[in-house]
Amino acid sequence: MSYLSIQGLHKSYGATSIFSDINCEIAKGEFITLLGPSGCGKSTLLRCIAGLTGVNGGQIRLDGEDLVPVAPQKRGIGMVFQSYALFPNMTVQQNVAFGLRMQKVKGSEAEQRVEEVLELVELNDFANRYPPQLSGGQCQRVALARSLVTRPRLLLLDEPLSALDARIRKHLREQIRNIQQELGLTTIFVTHDQEEALVMSDRIFLMNGGKIVQSGDAETLYTAPADAFAAGFIGNYNLLDADAASRLLLRPINSRVAIRPEAIQIGAQGSIEALVRSHSLLGNVIRYSIEARGVELLVDVLNRSPADLHARGQRINLNIEDNAICEVA
Amino acid sequence: MSHAENRSPLFHQLVVYALMLILLMPLLGTLIYSLSTSWSATILPSGLTFKWYLALWSDARFLSAFGRSLLVCFAALALSLVLILPLLFVVSYHFPKLDAVMNVLILLPFAIPPVVSSVGLMQLFAGGPLPILGTPWILIGCYFTIALPFMYRAISNNLQAINLRDLMDAAHLLGASTWRAAFMVVLPNLRKGLMVSVFLSFSFLFGEFVFANLLVGSRYETLQVYLYNMRNDSGHFTSALVISYFMFVLLMTWAANRLNKDKS
Protein backbone atom coordinates (compact mmCIF):
# COMPACT_ATOMS: atom_id res chain seq x y z
CA MET A 1 0.00 0.00 0.00
CA SER A 2 1.57 3.25 -1.06
CA TYR A 3 1.81 6.26 1.25
CA LEU A 4 1.83 8.98 -1.38
CA SER A 5 -0.01 8.26 -4.58
CA ILE A 6 -0.19 10.63 -7.52
CA GLN A 7 -2.67 9.85 -10.27
CA GLY A 8 -3.20 11.54 -13.62
CA LEU A 9 -1.75 14.82 -12.37
CA HIS A 10 -1.93 17.58 -14.94
CA LYS A 11 -0.61 21.14 -14.87
CA SER A 12 -0.56 23.80 -17.55
CA TYR A 13 -0.12 27.55 -17.76
CA GLY A 14 -2.58 28.70 -20.39
CA ALA A 15 -1.82 26.65 -23.48
CA THR A 16 1.60 25.56 -22.24
CA SER A 17 1.48 22.17 -20.62
CA ILE A 18 4.07 21.79 -17.84
CA PHE A 19 3.32 18.12 -17.25
CA SER A 20 0.42 15.85 -17.96
CA ASP A 21 -0.72 12.48 -16.67
CA ILE A 22 1.91 12.07 -13.95
CA ASN A 23 1.44 8.80 -12.07
CA CYS A 24 3.56 7.50 -9.24
CA GLU A 25 3.40 5.58 -5.98
CA ILE A 26 5.72 6.27 -3.08
CA ALA A 27 6.02 4.10 0.03
CA LYS A 28 6.31 5.39 3.58
CA GLY A 29 9.89 6.29 4.55
CA GLU A 30 11.18 6.26 0.99
CA PHE A 31 13.69 8.82 -0.27
CA ILE A 32 12.65 9.71 -3.82
CA THR A 33 14.62 11.95 -6.15
CA LEU A 34 13.06 13.82 -9.05
CA LEU A 35 15.95 14.15 -11.46
CA GLY A 36 15.92 16.02 -14.73
CA PRO A 37 17.19 18.98 -16.73
CA SER A 38 15.92 22.46 -15.91
CA GLY A 39 12.44 23.09 -17.30
CA CYS A 40 11.41 19.43 -17.15
CA GLY A 41 8.65 20.19 -14.64
CA LYS A 42 10.23 18.63 -11.55
CA SER A 43 10.10 21.76 -9.40
CA THR A 44 6.54 22.51 -10.50
CA LEU A 45 5.53 18.96 -9.57
CA LEU A 46 7.05 19.51 -6.12
CA ARG A 47 5.23 22.83 -5.71
CA CYS A 48 1.96 21.15 -6.72
CA ILE A 49 2.45 18.47 -4.06
CA ALA A 50 3.12 21.24 -1.51
CA GLY A 51 0.02 23.12 -2.67
CA LEU A 52 1.95 26.27 -3.57
CA THR A 53 0.85 25.87 -7.18
CA GLY A 54 -2.59 24.68 -8.19
CA VAL A 55 -3.14 21.72 -10.48
CA ASN A 56 -5.47 21.43 -13.47
CA GLY A 57 -6.46 17.86 -12.86
CA GLY A 58 -5.60 14.61 -11.14
CA GLN A 59 -5.19 13.39 -7.61
CA ILE A 60 -2.53 13.59 -4.93
CA ARG A 61 -3.29 11.17 -2.11
CA LEU A 62 -1.22 11.30 1.07
CA ASP A 63 -2.00 8.58 3.59
CA GLY A 64 -5.36 8.04 1.91
CA GLU A 65 -6.42 11.72 1.94
CA ASP A 66 -6.80 13.69 -1.27
CA LEU A 67 -4.59 16.77 -0.93
CA VAL A 68 -5.72 18.74 -3.98
CA PRO A 69 -8.53 20.68 -2.22
CA VAL A 70 -6.46 21.17 0.97
CA ALA A 71 -4.71 24.52 1.62
CA PRO A 72 -0.90 24.39 1.87
CA GLN A 73 -1.12 25.42 5.55
CA LYS A 74 -3.12 22.30 6.35
CA ARG A 75 -1.25 19.68 4.32
CA GLY A 76 1.35 18.85 6.97
CA ILE A 77 4.14 19.09 4.43
CA GLY A 78 7.60 20.54 5.14
CA MET A 79 9.66 22.12 2.42
CA VAL A 80 13.22 23.38 1.99
CA PHE A 81 13.97 25.90 -0.75
CA GLN A 82 17.08 26.50 -2.84
CA SER A 83 17.15 30.11 -1.61
CA TYR A 84 16.86 28.94 2.07
CA ALA A 85 13.89 31.35 2.51
CA LEU A 86 14.84 32.00 6.12
CA PHE A 87 13.09 34.95 7.77
CA PRO A 88 15.87 37.56 8.04
CA ASN A 89 14.16 39.44 10.89
CA MET A 90 14.15 36.42 13.19
CA THR A 91 16.94 34.57 14.98
CA VAL A 92 17.69 30.94 14.18
CA GLN A 93 15.66 29.97 17.24
CA GLN A 94 12.67 32.11 16.17
CA ASN A 95 12.88 30.84 12.60
CA VAL A 96 12.70 27.24 13.75
CA ALA A 97 9.97 28.02 16.29
CA PHE A 98 7.81 29.79 13.67
CA GLY A 99 5.92 26.65 12.61
CA LEU A 100 5.20 25.74 16.24
CA ARG A 101 3.98 29.26 16.92
CA MET A 102 1.52 28.90 14.03
CA GLN A 103 0.34 25.57 15.49
CA LYS A 104 0.02 27.25 18.91
CA VAL A 105 2.49 24.89 20.54
CA LYS A 106 3.66 26.92 23.52
CA GLY A 107 6.13 27.19 26.37
CA SER A 108 8.51 24.44 27.39
CA GLU A 109 7.26 21.93 24.83
CA ALA A 110 8.01 24.32 21.97
CA GLU A 111 11.41 25.18 23.43
CA GLN A 112 12.30 21.54 23.79
CA ARG A 113 11.27 20.62 20.27
CA VAL A 114 13.27 23.53 18.81
CA GLU A 115 16.29 22.43 20.82
CA GLU A 116 15.90 18.86 19.59
CA VAL A 117 15.87 19.73 15.90
CA LEU A 118 18.71 22.21 16.29
CA GLU A 119 20.70 19.40 17.86
CA LEU A 120 19.78 17.18 14.94
CA VAL A 121 21.35 19.67 12.49
CA GLU A 122 24.20 20.51 14.91
CA LEU A 123 23.34 24.18 15.27
CA ASN A 124 22.62 24.59 19.02
CA ASP A 125 25.39 27.14 19.41
CA PHE A 126 23.87 29.36 16.75
CA ALA A 127 20.36 29.67 18.16
CA ASN A 128 20.61 33.40 18.79
CA ARG A 129 22.24 34.39 15.51
CA TYR A 130 20.41 36.06 12.63
CA PRO A 131 20.41 34.39 9.18
CA PRO A 132 22.70 37.01 7.56
CA GLN A 133 25.36 36.03 10.11
CA LEU A 134 25.40 32.39 8.93
CA SER A 135 27.13 30.64 6.04
CA GLY A 136 25.11 29.09 3.20
CA GLY A 137 25.44 25.57 4.60
CA GLN A 138 24.34 26.69 8.05
CA CYS A 139 21.39 28.58 6.56
CA GLN A 140 20.22 25.46 4.77
CA ARG A 141 20.52 23.41 7.96
CA VAL A 142 18.37 25.98 9.76
CA ALA A 143 15.84 25.72 6.93
CA LEU A 144 15.89 21.93 7.30
CA ALA A 145 15.39 22.20 11.06
CA ARG A 146 12.55 24.66 10.55
CA SER A 147 10.73 22.25 8.25
CA LEU A 148 11.33 19.25 10.55
CA VAL A 149 10.16 20.82 13.79
CA THR A 150 6.47 20.57 12.87
CA ARG A 151 6.92 16.82 12.25
CA PRO A 152 5.68 16.92 8.65
CA ARG A 153 4.08 13.90 7.01
CA LEU A 154 6.17 14.53 3.93
CA LEU A 155 9.40 16.44 3.39
CA LEU A 156 10.04 18.21 0.09
CA LEU A 157 13.52 19.44 -0.83
CA ASP A 158 13.72 21.78 -3.82
CA GLU A 159 17.35 21.77 -4.99
CA PRO A 160 18.51 22.54 -1.46
CA LEU A 161 22.19 21.99 -2.26
CA SER A 162 22.47 23.87 -5.54
CA ALA A 163 23.60 27.17 -4.01
CA LEU A 164 26.35 25.62 -1.89
CA ASP A 165 29.99 24.91 -2.67
CA ALA A 166 31.13 21.38 -3.46
CA ARG A 167 32.58 20.35 -0.09
CA ILE A 168 29.62 21.56 1.97
CA ARG A 169 27.25 20.04 -0.56
CA LYS A 170 28.75 16.57 -0.05
CA HIS A 171 28.67 16.88 3.72
CA LEU A 172 25.12 18.19 3.82
CA ARG A 173 23.72 15.54 1.49
CA GLU A 174 25.04 12.85 3.84
CA GLN A 175 23.54 14.68 6.78
CA ILE A 176 20.16 15.01 5.05
CA ARG A 177 20.15 11.31 4.17
CA ASN A 178 21.10 10.31 7.74
CA ILE A 179 18.40 12.47 9.31
CA GLN A 180 15.83 11.18 6.81
CA GLN A 181 16.64 7.57 7.67
CA GLU A 182 16.77 8.25 11.40
CA LEU A 183 13.29 9.81 11.34
CA GLY A 184 11.94 7.41 8.69
CA LEU A 185 10.65 10.48 6.87
CA THR A 186 9.09 10.14 3.42
CA THR A 187 11.09 12.60 1.33
CA ILE A 188 11.00 13.95 -2.21
CA PHE A 189 14.18 15.61 -3.36
CA VAL A 190 14.51 17.63 -6.56
CA THR A 191 17.86 18.00 -8.28
CA HIS A 192 19.50 18.28 -11.69
CA ASP A 193 22.69 16.70 -10.36
CA GLN A 194 22.88 13.00 -11.22
CA GLU A 195 25.57 12.31 -8.64
CA GLU A 196 23.36 13.64 -5.82
CA ALA A 197 20.47 11.57 -7.12
CA LEU A 198 22.51 8.35 -7.37
CA VAL A 199 24.11 8.73 -3.93
CA MET A 200 21.07 9.75 -1.88
CA SER A 201 17.97 8.06 -3.23
CA ASP A 202 16.07 4.88 -2.63
CA ARG A 203 14.45 5.44 -5.99
CA ILE A 204 14.96 7.99 -8.75
CA PHE A 205 12.25 9.38 -11.02
CA LEU A 206 13.96 10.66 -14.14
CA MET A 207 11.92 13.44 -15.73
CA ASN A 208 12.05 15.04 -19.15
CA GLY A 209 9.60 17.31 -20.94
CA GLY A 210 6.90 16.95 -18.29
CA LYS A 211 7.01 13.15 -18.16
CA ILE A 212 8.54 10.59 -15.86
CA VAL A 213 10.82 8.87 -18.34
CA GLN A 214 12.14 6.17 -16.06
CA SER A 215 11.92 5.26 -12.41
CA GLY A 216 13.95 2.80 -10.40
CA ASP A 217 16.84 2.48 -8.02
CA ALA A 218 20.21 4.05 -8.77
CA GLU A 219 21.71 0.87 -10.20
CA THR A 220 18.89 0.23 -12.64
CA LEU A 221 18.92 3.78 -13.85
CA TYR A 222 22.64 3.78 -14.33
CA THR A 223 23.10 0.40 -15.98
CA ALA A 224 19.84 0.08 -17.92
CA PRO A 225 18.75 3.43 -19.32
CA ALA A 226 15.26 3.21 -20.77
CA ASP A 227 15.84 5.50 -23.74
CA ALA A 228 18.34 7.77 -25.42
CA PHE A 229 17.48 10.67 -23.11
CA ALA A 230 18.09 8.59 -19.98
CA ALA A 231 21.37 7.35 -21.40
CA GLY A 232 22.42 10.87 -22.31
CA PHE A 233 21.47 12.38 -18.96
CA ILE A 234 22.91 9.81 -16.59
CA GLY A 235 26.58 8.95 -16.70
CA ASN A 236 28.61 9.81 -19.78
CA TYR A 237 27.24 7.20 -22.12
CA ASN A 238 28.58 6.86 -25.66
CA LEU A 239 25.43 7.15 -27.75
CA LEU A 240 25.83 5.61 -31.20
CA ASP A 241 23.27 5.52 -33.99
CA ALA A 242 22.58 2.19 -35.73
CA ASP A 243 25.07 2.82 -38.59
CA ALA A 244 27.98 3.74 -36.36
CA ALA A 245 27.23 0.84 -34.01
CA SER A 246 27.18 -1.67 -36.90
CA ARG A 247 30.50 -0.33 -38.16
CA LEU A 248 32.12 -0.49 -34.74
CA LEU A 249 30.87 -3.94 -33.75
CA LEU A 250 31.04 -5.45 -37.26
CA ARG A 251 27.53 -6.88 -37.11
CA PRO A 252 24.17 -5.51 -38.22
CA ILE A 253 22.44 -3.49 -35.50
CA ASN A 254 19.13 -1.75 -36.12
CA SER A 255 18.68 0.49 -33.12
CA ARG A 256 20.59 3.10 -31.23
CA VAL A 257 23.18 1.80 -28.80
CA ALA A 258 24.52 3.18 -25.54
CA ILE A 259 27.88 2.07 -24.16
CA ARG A 260 29.21 3.19 -20.80
CA PRO A 261 32.74 4.64 -21.09
CA GLU A 262 34.06 2.52 -18.21
CA ALA A 263 32.74 -0.69 -19.81
CA ILE A 264 35.20 -0.44 -22.70
CA GLN A 265 38.57 -2.02 -21.96
CA ILE A 266 41.90 -0.98 -23.39
CA GLY A 267 44.34 -3.87 -23.73
CA ALA A 268 46.35 -6.06 -26.06
CA GLN A 269 43.69 -8.78 -26.15
CA GLY A 270 41.10 -6.41 -27.64
CA SER A 271 39.84 -7.04 -31.15
CA ILE A 272 39.08 -3.46 -32.17
CA GLU A 273 42.02 -1.39 -33.37
CA ALA A 274 41.87 2.22 -32.30
CA LEU A 275 43.75 5.50 -32.03
CA VAL A 276 44.07 7.75 -28.97
CA ARG A 277 42.92 11.26 -29.92
CA SER A 278 43.28 12.97 -26.56
CA HIS A 279 42.93 12.37 -22.85
CA SER A 280 41.97 14.34 -19.80
CA LEU A 281 42.67 13.62 -16.17
CA LEU A 282 39.55 13.69 -13.96
CA GLY A 283 41.48 12.70 -10.82
CA ASN A 284 40.96 9.01 -10.08
CA VAL A 285 39.83 8.44 -13.67
CA ILE A 286 41.47 9.17 -17.01
CA ARG A 287 39.00 9.91 -19.80
CA TYR A 288 40.28 9.07 -23.29
CA SER A 289 38.79 10.28 -26.50
CA ILE A 290 39.37 7.44 -28.93
CA GLU A 291 38.68 6.85 -32.61
CA ALA A 292 37.88 3.29 -33.63
CA ARG A 293 36.64 2.32 -37.12
CA GLY A 294 35.63 5.89 -37.77
CA VAL A 295 33.59 6.16 -34.56
CA GLU A 296 34.40 8.58 -31.71
CA LEU A 297 34.29 6.97 -28.27
CA LEU A 298 34.86 8.10 -24.71
CA VAL A 299 36.68 5.55 -22.59
CA ASP A 300 37.22 5.84 -18.84
CA VAL A 301 40.13 4.04 -17.21
CA LEU A 302 41.03 3.96 -13.54
CA ASN A 303 44.12 6.07 -12.93
CA ARG A 304 46.31 3.33 -11.39
CA SER A 305 49.81 4.60 -12.23
CA PRO A 306 51.32 7.20 -14.52
CA ALA A 307 53.12 4.40 -16.41
CA ASP A 308 49.80 3.13 -17.80
CA LEU A 309 48.98 6.39 -19.55
CA HIS A 310 48.39 6.09 -23.29
CA ALA A 311 49.85 9.07 -25.14
CA ARG A 312 48.07 11.00 -27.85
CA GLY A 313 48.41 9.32 -31.25
CA GLN A 314 49.18 5.92 -29.75
CA ARG A 315 47.61 2.86 -31.39
CA ILE A 316 45.73 0.61 -28.98
CA ASN A 317 43.21 -2.23 -28.98
CA LEU A 318 39.74 -2.05 -27.46
CA ASN A 319 37.49 -4.74 -26.12
CA ILE A 320 33.76 -4.22 -25.69
CA GLU A 321 31.85 -6.99 -23.92
CA ASP A 322 28.42 -7.86 -25.22
CA ASN A 323 26.62 -7.16 -21.92
CA ALA A 324 27.99 -3.60 -21.92
CA ILE A 325 26.13 -2.85 -25.13
CA CYS A 326 22.76 -1.42 -24.31
CA GLU A 327 20.18 -0.95 -27.05
CA VAL A 328 18.00 2.10 -26.48
CA ALA A 329 14.89 3.34 -28.21
CA MET B 1 52.66 61.03 -13.28
CA SER B 2 54.26 60.47 -9.87
CA HIS B 3 54.32 64.20 -9.42
CA ALA B 4 50.58 64.39 -9.86
CA GLU B 5 50.03 61.41 -7.52
CA ASN B 6 52.08 63.01 -4.75
CA ARG B 7 50.03 66.12 -4.93
CA SER B 8 46.65 64.58 -5.46
CA PRO B 9 45.62 63.92 -1.82
CA LEU B 10 46.15 67.54 -0.87
CA PHE B 11 44.49 68.73 -4.05
CA HIS B 12 41.49 66.49 -3.54
CA GLN B 13 41.12 67.62 0.06
CA LEU B 14 41.27 71.24 -1.03
CA VAL B 15 38.51 70.70 -3.56
CA VAL B 16 36.30 68.98 -1.00
CA TYR B 17 36.87 71.65 1.65
CA ALA B 18 36.29 74.46 -0.84
CA LEU B 19 33.02 72.84 -1.92
CA MET B 20 31.89 72.40 1.67
CA LEU B 21 32.73 76.03 2.39
CA ILE B 22 30.74 77.24 -0.60
CA LEU B 23 27.76 75.12 0.43
CA LEU B 24 27.90 76.11 4.07
CA MET B 25 28.56 79.82 3.51
CA PRO B 26 24.94 80.95 3.03
CA LEU B 27 23.83 78.79 5.93
CA LEU B 28 26.57 80.15 8.16
CA GLY B 29 25.70 83.71 7.12
CA THR B 30 22.06 83.11 7.94
CA LEU B 31 22.98 81.57 11.30
CA ILE B 32 25.12 84.55 12.31
CA TYR B 33 22.54 87.00 11.04
CA SER B 34 19.84 85.31 13.09
CA LEU B 35 22.01 85.62 16.19
CA SER B 36 23.06 89.25 15.75
CA THR B 37 21.42 92.38 17.18
CA SER B 38 22.06 94.27 13.97
CA TRP B 39 24.41 93.72 11.04
CA SER B 40 24.28 96.27 8.25
CA ALA B 41 27.19 98.61 7.57
CA THR B 42 29.89 96.72 9.47
CA ILE B 43 31.98 93.65 8.59
CA LEU B 44 31.05 91.87 11.79
CA PRO B 45 27.68 92.07 13.58
CA SER B 46 27.51 94.67 16.32
CA GLY B 47 26.29 92.26 19.01
CA LEU B 48 24.94 88.74 19.62
CA THR B 49 21.48 87.95 20.91
CA PHE B 50 18.89 85.16 21.17
CA LYS B 51 15.94 87.54 21.02
CA TRP B 52 14.96 86.64 17.45
CA TYR B 53 14.65 82.99 18.37
CA LEU B 54 12.71 83.88 21.50
CA ALA B 55 10.42 86.08 19.48
CA LEU B 56 9.94 83.37 16.85
CA TRP B 57 9.23 80.51 19.25
CA SER B 58 6.78 82.59 21.24
CA ASP B 59 4.87 83.69 18.13
CA ALA B 60 1.56 81.81 18.12
CA ARG B 61 1.21 82.22 14.35
CA PHE B 62 4.59 80.53 13.79
CA LEU B 63 3.76 77.67 16.15
CA SER B 64 0.46 76.96 14.47
CA ALA B 65 2.06 77.15 11.00
CA PHE B 66 4.68 74.67 12.23
CA GLY B 67 1.93 72.43 13.56
CA ARG B 68 -0.03 72.63 10.31
CA SER B 69 3.03 71.69 8.27
CA LEU B 70 3.67 68.69 10.51
CA LEU B 71 0.04 67.65 10.31
CA VAL B 72 -0.20 67.90 6.53
CA CYS B 73 3.12 66.05 6.03
CA PHE B 74 2.28 63.23 8.42
CA ALA B 75 -1.23 62.86 7.01
CA ALA B 76 0.15 62.64 3.47
CA LEU B 77 2.79 60.11 4.54
CA ALA B 78 0.26 58.03 6.45
CA LEU B 79 -2.02 58.01 3.41
CA SER B 80 0.81 56.91 1.13
CA LEU B 81 1.85 54.13 3.51
CA VAL B 82 -1.68 52.83 3.85
CA LEU B 83 -2.15 52.82 0.06
CA ILE B 84 1.30 51.91 -1.25
CA LEU B 85 2.20 49.03 1.07
CA PRO B 86 -0.73 46.78 0.21
CA LEU B 87 -0.55 47.87 -3.42
CA LEU B 88 3.12 46.94 -3.70
CA PHE B 89 2.55 43.68 -1.92
CA VAL B 90 -0.24 42.73 -4.29
CA VAL B 91 1.70 43.85 -7.36
CA SER B 92 4.88 41.97 -6.53
CA TYR B 93 3.20 38.88 -5.14
CA HIS B 94 0.22 38.35 -7.42
CA PHE B 95 0.78 40.47 -10.53
CA PRO B 96 4.54 40.89 -11.12
CA LYS B 97 3.77 41.90 -14.71
CA LEU B 98 2.09 45.09 -13.50
CA ASP B 99 5.40 46.36 -12.15
CA ALA B 100 6.26 47.89 -15.52
CA VAL B 101 2.96 49.80 -15.60
CA MET B 102 3.49 51.00 -12.05
CA ASN B 103 6.97 52.25 -12.88
CA VAL B 104 5.54 54.53 -15.55
CA LEU B 105 2.66 55.60 -13.35
CA ILE B 106 4.81 56.69 -10.42
CA LEU B 107 6.99 58.84 -12.67
CA LEU B 108 4.02 61.02 -13.67
CA PRO B 109 4.33 63.46 -10.73
CA PHE B 110 7.88 64.14 -11.91
CA ALA B 111 6.87 64.69 -15.50
CA ILE B 112 4.55 67.64 -14.79
CA PRO B 113 6.04 70.84 -13.30
CA PRO B 114 4.41 71.87 -9.98
CA VAL B 115 3.18 75.18 -11.40
CA VAL B 116 1.37 73.43 -14.23
CA SER B 117 -0.19 70.73 -12.11
CA SER B 118 -1.24 73.20 -9.41
CA VAL B 119 -3.13 75.25 -12.00
CA GLY B 120 -4.83 72.06 -13.14
CA LEU B 121 -5.64 71.07 -9.57
CA MET B 122 -7.04 74.56 -8.87
CA GLN B 123 -9.49 74.28 -11.77
CA LEU B 124 -10.43 70.74 -10.90
CA PHE B 125 -11.11 71.26 -7.20
CA ALA B 126 -12.35 74.87 -7.16
CA GLY B 127 -15.93 73.70 -7.61
CA GLY B 128 -17.55 70.51 -8.81
CA PRO B 129 -18.34 67.57 -6.59
CA LEU B 130 -15.21 67.98 -4.46
CA PRO B 131 -14.59 71.69 -3.68
CA ILE B 132 -11.55 71.22 -1.45
CA LEU B 133 -9.41 74.02 -2.84
CA GLY B 134 -8.04 76.14 0.00
CA THR B 135 -8.47 73.37 2.57
CA PRO B 136 -5.67 71.17 3.92
CA TRP B 137 -7.31 68.16 2.22
CA ILE B 138 -6.15 69.17 -1.23
CA LEU B 139 -2.62 69.59 0.12
CA ILE B 140 -2.64 66.13 1.67
CA GLY B 141 -3.80 64.59 -1.61
CA CYS B 142 -1.28 66.58 -3.58
CA TYR B 143 1.60 65.72 -1.24
CA PHE B 144 0.64 62.09 -1.55
CA THR B 145 1.40 62.24 -5.29
CA ILE B 146 4.75 63.89 -4.58
CA ALA B 147 5.74 61.28 -2.01
CA LEU B 148 4.55 58.41 -4.22
CA PRO B 149 7.68 57.97 -6.39
CA PHE B 150 10.08 58.06 -3.41
CA MET B 151 8.04 55.64 -1.38
CA TYR B 152 7.29 53.27 -4.23
CA ARG B 153 10.90 53.03 -5.41
CA ALA B 154 12.41 52.55 -1.98
CA ILE B 155 9.90 49.94 -0.87
CA SER B 156 9.92 48.09 -4.16
CA ASN B 157 13.74 47.83 -4.13
CA ASN B 158 13.48 46.53 -0.60
CA LEU B 159 10.87 43.98 -1.65
CA GLN B 160 13.00 42.69 -4.48
CA ALA B 161 15.92 42.22 -2.11
CA ILE B 162 14.04 39.92 0.26
CA ASN B 163 12.83 37.23 -2.17
CA LEU B 164 9.19 37.76 -1.31
CA ARG B 165 7.79 34.70 -3.04
CA ASP B 166 9.95 32.14 -1.27
CA LEU B 167 9.44 33.80 2.11
CA MET B 168 5.67 33.75 1.63
CA ASP B 169 5.75 30.12 0.44
CA ALA B 170 7.84 29.08 3.43
CA ALA B 171 5.53 30.89 5.85
CA HIS B 172 2.43 29.36 4.21
CA LEU B 173 3.81 25.83 4.49
CA LEU B 174 4.63 26.43 8.15
CA GLY B 175 0.95 27.19 8.71
CA ALA B 176 0.73 30.99 8.46
CA SER B 177 -2.15 32.64 6.63
CA THR B 178 -1.29 35.26 4.01
CA TRP B 179 -2.14 38.07 6.47
CA ARG B 180 -0.03 36.67 9.26
CA ALA B 181 2.86 36.00 6.88
CA ALA B 182 2.66 39.56 5.58
CA PHE B 183 2.70 41.04 9.09
CA MET B 184 5.19 38.72 10.73
CA VAL B 185 7.61 38.02 7.93
CA VAL B 186 7.35 40.60 5.15
CA LEU B 187 6.62 43.85 7.01
CA PRO B 188 9.51 43.63 9.50
CA ASN B 189 11.90 43.12 6.62
CA LEU B 190 10.65 46.25 4.85
CA ARG B 191 11.50 48.41 7.86
CA LYS B 192 14.63 49.84 6.32
CA GLY B 193 13.04 50.82 3.02
CA LEU B 194 10.06 52.29 4.85
CA MET B 195 12.19 54.40 7.18
CA VAL B 196 14.36 55.75 4.39
CA SER B 197 11.43 56.64 2.16
CA VAL B 198 9.34 58.18 4.95
CA PHE B 199 12.11 60.46 6.18
CA LEU B 200 13.21 61.39 2.70
CA SER B 201 9.67 62.31 1.71
CA PHE B 202 9.14 64.10 5.00
CA SER B 203 12.07 66.49 4.64
CA PHE B 204 11.04 67.09 1.06
CA LEU B 205 7.38 67.79 1.85
CA PHE B 206 8.17 69.86 4.93
CA GLY B 207 9.96 72.40 2.76
CA GLU B 208 7.41 72.38 -0.08
CA PHE B 209 6.24 75.89 -1.07
CA VAL B 210 4.77 76.02 -4.59
CA PHE B 211 1.73 73.78 -4.03
CA ALA B 212 1.17 75.06 -0.50
CA ASN B 213 1.13 78.68 -1.65
CA LEU B 214 -0.91 78.22 -4.80
CA LEU B 215 -3.47 75.68 -3.63
CA VAL B 216 -4.06 76.84 -0.08
CA GLY B 217 -2.01 79.96 0.63
CA SER B 218 -2.88 81.94 3.77
CA ARG B 219 -6.16 80.11 4.30
CA TYR B 220 -4.20 77.29 5.92
CA GLU B 221 -0.80 78.78 6.52
CA THR B 222 2.01 76.21 6.51
CA LEU B 223 5.59 76.88 7.54
CA GLN B 224 6.90 77.85 4.12
CA VAL B 225 3.92 80.07 3.40
CA TYR B 226 4.41 81.72 6.79
CA LEU B 227 8.05 82.37 5.92
CA TYR B 228 6.93 83.90 2.63
CA ASN B 229 4.37 86.12 4.34
CA MET B 230 7.02 87.29 6.80
CA ARG B 231 9.36 88.38 4.01
CA ASN B 232 8.84 92.08 4.75
CA ASP B 233 9.50 91.62 8.46
CA SER B 234 12.93 91.84 10.09
CA GLY B 235 15.54 89.79 8.23
CA HIS B 236 16.92 88.62 11.57
CA PHE B 237 13.55 87.13 12.43
CA THR B 238 13.18 85.22 9.13
CA SER B 239 16.79 84.03 9.44
CA ALA B 240 15.96 82.55 12.82
CA LEU B 241 13.00 80.85 11.14
CA VAL B 242 15.16 79.39 8.35
CA ILE B 243 17.75 78.11 10.83
CA SER B 244 15.06 76.60 13.05
CA TYR B 245 13.54 74.86 10.06
CA PHE B 246 16.92 73.60 8.94
CA MET B 247 17.85 72.27 12.38
CA PHE B 248 14.55 70.43 12.62
CA VAL B 249 15.02 68.65 9.30
CA LEU B 250 18.63 67.89 10.25
CA LEU B 251 17.47 66.36 13.50
CA MET B 252 14.92 64.20 11.69
CA THR B 253 17.53 62.99 9.20
CA TRP B 254 19.98 62.20 11.97
CA ALA B 255 17.30 60.27 13.86
CA ALA B 256 16.44 58.33 10.71
CA ASN B 257 20.07 57.37 10.20
CA ARG B 258 20.40 56.26 13.81
CA LEU B 259 17.30 54.08 13.58
CA ASN B 260 18.57 52.45 10.43
CA LYS B 261 22.01 51.63 11.75
CA ASP B 262 20.75 49.84 14.85
CA LYS B 263 19.85 46.60 13.12
CA SER B 264 22.82 46.11 10.82
Image (cartoon, coloured by chain):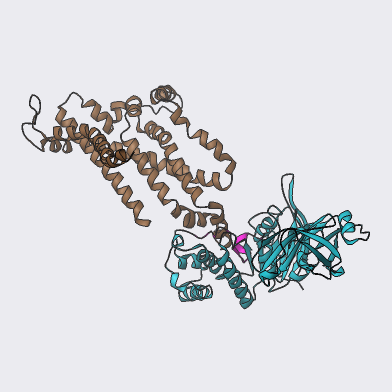
Chain colours: A cyan, B brown
In the image, what residue occupies the spot 67% across and 65% down? A195
Q: Where B243 falls versus A71 (above or below)?
A: above
- Whether A76 is among the magenta residues is yes
* Left or right: where A316 falls relative to B92: right
- Specify the principal SS of the magenta part: loop
Quadrant of res A317 = bottom right
A67 on left or right of A173 = right
Residue found at the very far left of the displayed protein: B46
Query: Who is closer to the viewer here, A315 or A265?
Result: A315
Q: Which quarter of the figure has residue A48? A: bottom right
Task: Examine the rendered structure and indicate whether residue A118 appears above or below residue A316.
Answer: below
Residue A320, quarter of the rendered image: bottom right
Query: In this rendering, does residue A226 appear at all?
Result: no
At x 70%, y 72%, the residue is A30
Where is residue A98? Give x, y as percent.
50, 65
Q: Report x, y in % for residue A33.
A: 69, 65
Please indicate, yes or no, whether residue A37 appears anywhere in the rendered image. Answer: yes
**Residue numbers of the magenta segment:** A70-88
Tell whether position A108 is magenta: no
